[in-house]
Amino acid sequence: KENHSISEFVVPLQKYISDCGFQITCGCNEQVSYSAIFLRAQFNRGLKDKWIREHSLQSNVTSFDELFNKAVALEASRIGSREISNQQNTSKVPELNKLSCVPRNREYHNNKKSYTHSRKRCSNSRSKSSSRGRINYHDLGIENCCISCGKSDHKANECRIQRKS
């Protein structure tokens, strides 16, 4: 079920399996319990988290108790890492919607016309992403660097290293 933990899922499953009494007599005259096999199969089918299910199916663990303990540990690990990532996300200021004021000089961007003044243009980083223009590599300090390989003796259009796509 969606909102139940693995521990809550296993309790009724074990009860139903124990009521069935799947016992057979083997050719070696020993009582063999199929309930452990059925319990393990139903347990794997009922796991809601695909990642935990994949780990339990790939596991070499043979007893149900070991499999159950491993699944509970994986579930706890998953919940713990989700809580840690949520704490990290709430403590950071989201950079996507930050407003930034960037000084722009019209002389620099438009060489044909000579304008003598510069102005500040405030823009939302989320808007106008397609109409921004060219990246100013000089301001970034990488005007003579290749953006493909990182070397400073050539530019990307002259790069000898083939790009992997």
Image (cartoon, helix red, strand yellow):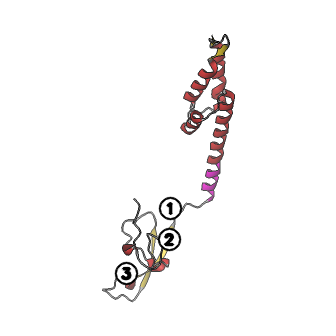
Q: CA distance from mark 1 to mark 3?
A: 26 Å
Q: Residue extending furthest left?
A: 112
Residue receiving disc 1: 96
Residue 20: horizontal and vertical position, in percent?
A: 62, 13
Q: Which residues are magenta?
A: 83-91
Is the stretch drawn in magenta largely helix, strand or loop? helix
Residue receiving disc 3: 109
Res 120 visible? no
Q: Is residue 148 above or below residue 139?
A: above
Identify which residue is drawn at 63% across, 18% down: 35
Q: Amino acid at mark 2?
A: Ser
Eye-nearest disc, 2 or 3: 3
Q: Amino acid at mark 1?
A: Leu
Helix, strand or loop for disc 3:
helix
Q: Amino acid at mark 3?
A: His
Q: CA distance from mark 2 to mark 1?
A: 11 Å
Res 107 visible? yes
